[in-house]
């Protein structure tokens, strides 16, 4: 992968600036720095290796050189989109899941920010906002996809099982093709950010739908219930053992099946 191949592969998409790095700390950090400047909507940062890739709450995301897709998309939301930005992580997860499903993979979304294949994590998404006073100026959507087997960290370093596209498909697909597919679906789906169609599509691909799950959050006791769907802002809905409906909002929450 290099800057020329990247630009050539994405030339038909209506993207902003495209930047490739052989090695970088975190593509999200680079995107956040650029977002502060006049970077246009749909600008993209891609790296062949991340040395300080991040998940939520600064947990580490591993991206060994040449093995994975690591990219960050800079969005400049319109006034119409701004009230719906909690849904951005769902839009990105749907773009990844739907593009992988086109390759015959049964990808599902582990709410809020992971994509699974056969119950194992193949992709993580980290959305971060840049504020201008009370107003969101930019949203950075970071996407990490495990493409080759070597991108998957050792299982004893993980809190949730992981897999790669190579493992699931039998051969590693081209990273540039995976990236182009994801961006194509993302751009196609973006108008739905402001419609409930997005919520319906997102809900239809949720992993553990109808199953008993546990949601862990900080030091408070975990919430246990059956996963019933999504609220209109993308919050998760459960039904507990007393038949009560519970809404889990975004934040430092970790969903686990209770099988
Ligand atoms: P989980 O439910 O998997 O714990 P999370 O989305 O709550 O995920 P985050 O902190 O957001 O957790 O994601 C980072 C976590 O993902 C790390 O703590 C690590 O366990 C795991 N991880 C790191 N790199 C990879 C990777 N390349 N593939 C799969 N999982 C990874
Ligand atoms: C998660 O599951 O916690 C989210 C992981 C997000 C990883 C991607 S890789 C590209 C971008 N740069 C980062 O530092 N993180 C995101």
Image: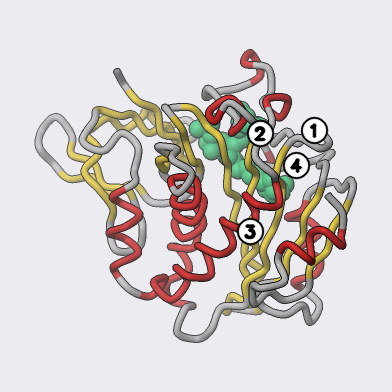
Instruction: Say which element carries label 4.
Output: loop
| 181 over 172 or under it: above or below | below
Give the CA separation, mark 4 to mark 3: 21 Å
Using the rendered image of the protein, determine whether residue 39 is visible from the camera's viewpoint. Answer: yes
- Provide the residue designation for mark 4: 53
Q: Quadrant of residue 184?
A: bottom right
Q: Is label 2 or label 4 in front?
A: 2
Q: Residue at x 69, y 41 (%)?
A: 58
- Between 13 and 223, the one nearer to me in the picture: 13
Q: Nearer the viewer, residue 133 or 253?
A: 253
Residue that protrudes farthest toward the left in the picture: 243
Residue found at x 10% / y 33%: 242
Answer yes or no: disc 1 within 8 Å of ligand 1.
no
Q: Which mark is residue 122?
A: none
Q: Which mark is residue 172?
A: 2
Closer to the chain start, of discs 1 and 4, is: 4
Give the Cα distance between marks 2 and 1.
15 Å
Residue at horizontal 37%, vertical 33%?
A: 215
Mark nearer the viewer, 1 or 4: 1
Query: Which residue was labeled with disc 3?
Result: 180
- Of tags 4 and 3, the one toward the viewer is 3
Whole-number angstrom distance, CA of label 1 to CA of label 4: 10 Å
Q: Give the mark nearer the N terminus: 1 vs 3.
A: 1
Mark 2 and mark 4: Cα distance apart in space: 22 Å
Badge 4, how many Cα within 10 Å: few under 14, some, many 20+? many
Vertical side of 240 occupied by 35: above or below:
below
Q: In the figure, 76 relative to 214: above or below?
A: below
Q: Residues within 10 Å of mark 1 (few under 14, many from 20)?
A: many
Instruction: Pick the residue in front: 85 or 125.
Output: 125
Choose between 51 and 45: the one closer to the eye. 45
């Amino acid at each position: 992968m290099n800057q020329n191949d990247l630009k050539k592969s994405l030339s038909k998409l209506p993207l902003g600036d495209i930047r490739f790095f052989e090695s970088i700390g975190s593509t999200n950090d680079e995107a956040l720095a650029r977002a502060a400047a006049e970077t246009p909507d749909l600008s993209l940062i891609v790296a062949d290796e991340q040395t300080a890739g991040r998940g939520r709450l600064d947990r580490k995301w591993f991206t060994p050189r040449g093995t994975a897709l690591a990219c960050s998309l800079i969005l400049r939301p319109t006034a119409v989109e701004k009230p719906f930005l909690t849904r951005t992580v769902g839009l990105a997860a749907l773009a990844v899941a739907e593009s992988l499903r086109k390759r015959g993979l049964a990808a599902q979304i582990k709410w809020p920010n992971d994509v699974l294949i056969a119950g194992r994590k193949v992709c993580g998404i980290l959305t971060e906002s840049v504020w201008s006073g009370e107003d969101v100026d930019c949203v950075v959507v970071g996407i990490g996809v495990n493409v080759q087997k070597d991108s998957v960290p050792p299982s004893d370093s993980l809190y949730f099982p992981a897999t790669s596209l190579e493992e699931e498909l039998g051969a590693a697909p081209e990273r540039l093709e995976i990236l182009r597919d994801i961006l194509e679906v993302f751009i196609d789906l973006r108008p739905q950010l402001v419609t409930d169609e997005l919520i319906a599509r997102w809900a239809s691909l949720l992993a553990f739908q109808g199953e008993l799950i546990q949601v862990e959050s900080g030091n408070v006791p975990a919430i246990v219930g059956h996963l019933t769907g999504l609220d209109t802002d993308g919050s998760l809905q459960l039904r507990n053992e007393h038949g009560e409906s519970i809404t889990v909002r975004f934040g430092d929450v970790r969903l686990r099946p209770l099988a």
